[in-house]
Structures are given as C-alpha cells and as structure tokens.
Image (cartoon, coloured by chain):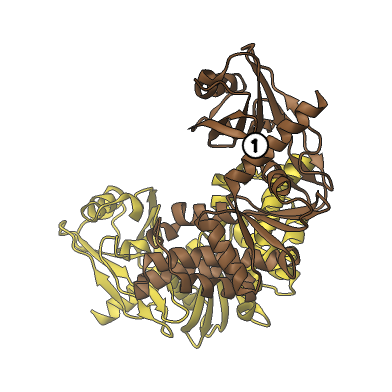
Chain colours: A brown, B yellow
Amino acid sequence: MTRADWIAADWGTTNLRVWAMKGGSVIDTAKSDAGMAQLDRDQFEAALLALIAPWLSDTTPVIACGMVGARQGWVEAPYSAVPCMPIANGVVLATSIDPRLRVHVIGGLKQEKPADVMRGEETQIAGFLALNTDWDGVICLPGTHTKWVHVSAGEIVSFQTFMTGEQFNLLSGASVLRHSVDAKGWDAQAFEEAVSDTLSRPERLAAYLFNLRARDLLHGQSKDTARARLSGLLIGAELGAARPFWLGQNVAILGADALAKAYSDALQLQGVHATIADAERMTLAGLQAAYRQIKETT
Amino acid sequence: MTRADWIAADWGTTNLRVWAMKGGSVIDTAKSDAGMAQLDRDQFEAALLALIAPWLSDTTPVIACGMVGARQGWVEAPYSAVPCMPIANGVVLATSIDPRLRVHVIGGLKQEKPADVMRGEETQIAGFLALNTDWDGVICLPGTHTKWVHVSAGEIVSFQTFMTGEQFNLLSGASVLRHSVDAKGWDAQAFEEAVSDTLSRPERLAAYLFNLRARDLLHGQSKDTARARLSGLLIGAELGAARPFWLGQNVAILGADALAKAYSDALQLQGVHATIADAERMTLAGLQAAYRQIKETT
C-alpha cells in the first residue's frame, strides 16, 4: 500500500507527471497526457485524481509547478519579478473539492525588460541550487522555449528565452523542409558545421534553411544530415545571441536528453565545458524544496 | 463565345489560375484551388479541363508555369542551371488525352552552389524583362519562399531563397505566438523598429520572437503591433543576409500586395527606392513570352 506523505506534480502544457513521496523518497510515480492545454479549469482536479487517488488517505499536500499555474491553468499563480529567489513568492492554493487534496501551485517568474517569462523552469533551477549550494553561473534549459538564466548568490538575476525548439519542430514537421528532414537520425559533423555557420553569419539563417531543401533536390543530401544541420543552424544562431550569458561563465545545462547533448557539443566547440544535470531530477528536487518551504511556513 | 488562341496557366502548389488569350489580349480568366499539392499525376488534365473546356475548339496550346512542372507535378520539367535566360530550355510537353489540349510546361532554374532552386518565379522574371528590355539589377520576389535574383544582360546570374514567408506563417499561425499575433492589422512604426532590430542584431531573432509573447503577457502589447513586429523581425534578418543583393543596386519588387509594400518600406529605410511591379501581370507577360518562343521554334 503506497500512501504518500505528499505528492509532487510537474504539470506542463502537454503532460502531467506525479510522484508519491515519503519524506525525500519516491515511492511511486505516474504520468498522463492531461496537460494544461487539454483541460478546462474545472477538469484539473479530476485529471489529478485519476493519477493520485490510490496514494491518498488523509489530507495530502500536492506541490505542483508548470503551466498549471498559468492564466489558462487551474489557478493563476502570479509571476514574481527578477531578481529574486527561484521560488520567490511561495505558492498559490488551488480550489479543490475532494477533502483529501490540498494543492499548492508554484508561481512563475517575469522580467520587465527585456520582457520575458518562465513557468516551471524556476522549479528546476530551485532544485539545481538545492543540490548545488553556493553555485554561481549560468543555467541553460533547452526545450521548446530554451531559457538562459543568470544565477548569483541563490537568486535569478536575469534570463532570456529563445524559441529555438519550437522553430525546429515547426520547420522540420510543418514546413517544406519536412520532405527533406528525418524525424530521427544525426550527423555530428553537419551539426558542428551548421553551428559555426550561423554563429558567424546569423543573418543568413532563412537562406540556410531553404538551402536544406535545395541540397536535397539537387544533391540528394541525406535526411539525417539535414536534421542535424537544421538543429545546428538554429542552435548556432541562439548561441550567437546568448553569448553574453555563456562567454567565460560557469555553465550548467538542465536536460540530459539528445537536445541537452547537442547544446553541450555546440558549447564545447566554443571552448565552454558545461555540466549536464538531469532535468526531471532537478524538477523533483525543486518541488521538494518548495514542500520544505511550505512546511516551515505553515 | 470565348474561343482562345492559346491559354496561359499559373499552376502553383495551392492554386490554378488560367487566362483565355487572343494574341496578346486576355478575353477570359478563371481560378480554382486545384493546386499541385492536391492532385495525383492523372488528375491534372481533368483539373485543367474543369476551368478551360469552354474556351477550347481545335487543338489549343496551353503554356503553364509553376509547381505543375515539379517531380510531384503533371510532368517533370527539369531545372536549367544559372547563369541562363529565365526561360532557358524552352518547355516540356505534358501527356494529355483530350485531343484539344497541347500543354507546355516551363522548366525551373537551379543554382549548384549555394544549392538553390526556383519554379514559377523564372516566368515572372521573364515577363518583367519582356516589359523592361535592357533592365539590369536585382529582382525581389516576396512570398512563402522569397527570392532575390541578380539579373544582367537578360540572364539570371545568381539567386538566393529565404524561408521568411513560411516562417511568418508558421510562427503566427502555429506557434505559441498565435495567441499574441493577429491575423490582420499593422503598425508601421513597430515594423520599422523591428526591421532595424534584426538588421543590426540578426542573431537575436529567436529571442526577439519569444519576447513578442512576453510583451503580450506582461505589457498587453496590441496584436496588430505584434504582427507588424513579427514581420519586421523576419524581413530585417533577411535584408541583413540579402545585403549583397540590394546594396547600391537597382531593385525591383514583383508583388504589389501588402507584403511587397512591407519589403519596399523596409528597403526605403536603408535608402533603397525599389520599383514595385504587379506579380500577376508579370506572370502573364512571362507566359506570353514563352508562347512567342514556342511559336517561333515550332
């Protein structure tokens, strides 16, 4: 019988992932595709119960992060303005009907100028800092909307978001390039060349993109090569813009999948040796830090 | 009764447009959404007849340009390599069953290095050069895949394609920005600022893109402004890469819609006063030039 002390929830746009916790230990886990984008406000509680009901007995705290706290989510958990601690304003309680639930949602972060927002990443960063106390430097969180985050003395000082991952998905899946780019496959040399192409000539991106199609039509370029080159072109352009973040800095990448590896390779080419940390583990550590914070203050 | 001497056809990926011609005069016109992407090889003839049957009597030449000549089209009309005349290798005959049809398809152009292709634009350029004899300079053809084309002594010397339009469509229609960008609306000042932002800092494009979302969430930026800014960011980056084409050059834009106007405005900011010519009129003039060429050689 797995009755949880508390429950951790990573609730994003497309997925819900939950962990049954006893103190600091995971005793069970579950996942569904009941992401924020699929749910109306009154459907969140049922989506959560569908996964965690077997773990409940008395009133159980649930600590959630991610898009569940967006305006279109279960409850709006306001943005705190940087510079601030990653989990700055504590949490917001969501309205639940089942008496066994007490759902705390972690708020996101905002930066006034240049305007920017994050929601979910602040929890990963809190987790990374909980596991690496006194760490100063820059954290890169690759994904649909890759973030570069400057961290100093336990605070998030500034950050910048790049739509690189979403551009990759749209271009490889929905543009004319879908005929020329495979869904999988890799070519390390093509990736490296592409990173260097857009780092040195970032304005040529839109031309390099169509060139991927023409190389297929005229020279039969392999679709693995095209996929690695597309990724490299987009990441190279991003690294060009993010240079003030990584140049001469202590860099950590929260990821550990193929995308995190690609960022690490691209940075390596610029002489930067980034630490890679598992993103899911950081999320859980961040939810745990928030749970401790809530216990101390209640 | 509108019996045509010959028929002009602009047959692209998504549309088919036909004109019934008596010599150089248009006597009727028709349009359908039977574009190349919607048709199997054996459906092209019926799609054409659905529009032009009323104009046919004896065997009638049809001159077609565009994706109808692609590998997935009615008949593959091979690419000619630049430098060459816009309608270089004449045409390829498509197989038709109806004895009243004789369908000539104009071939596209290719550039070996950097690899690039065009199909349809060569006919617009032929039309522009037929109407502007002895014209030398650079022709910009804005669209899904914008082309910059260097023309000298009646030949296409080199060209470069940018995926700017397709990026705009994907980002404004299918990315997270769709919530922040209107389908219509404009803000001339936001457009101009955005052009200048990416012309001077092209590598920041992916950051400027997410910033559009954050400006909406944090500052309630108008969706008209966001749309103009998105367009300006993409066109500014393109102008940065296309600088060797337009700097100090005689520039013509084949377009005449809002997009052509946007390119013209962006060039004006760089001190370049481009001539705008109607793209549809150029296509028809190019098909007419091809028709004359066929009559002379047969």
Q: Position of residue B12 (x, y in %)?
A: 39, 58
* Vertical order, B239 against A9 (above or below): below
Residue A90, image quadrant? top right
Q: Chain of mark 1?
A: A
| Residue at 58% in and 32% down | A36
Q: Position of residue B258 (x, y in %)?
A: 62, 55
Nearest the viewer among A230 and B221 is: A230
Residue B133 falls left or right of residue A273:
left
Extreme bottom residue here? Answer: B153
Residue A12 falls left or right of residue A152:
left
Nearest the viewer among A252 and A111 is: A252
Classed neighbour count for the residue bearing mark 1: other residues with Cα under 10 Å, few (<14), some (14–19), many (≥20): many
- Indicate the secondary structure of the residue bearing disc 1: loop
Q: Position of residue A266 (x, y in %)?
A: 58, 68
Nearest the viewer among A59 and B279 is: A59
Q: Position of residue A110 (x, y in %)?
A: 78, 44
User: On the rendered image, what quadrant is the C terminus of chain A found in?
Assistant: top right
Q: Does residue B208 appear in this view?
A: yes
The mark total stands at: 1
* Vertical order, A58 against B206 (above or below): above
* Vertical order, B198 against A151 (above or below): below
- The residue that mark 1 highlights is A66
Q: Amino acid at mark 1?
A: Gly
Residue B178, image quadrant? top right
Q: Does residue A201 appear in this view?
A: no
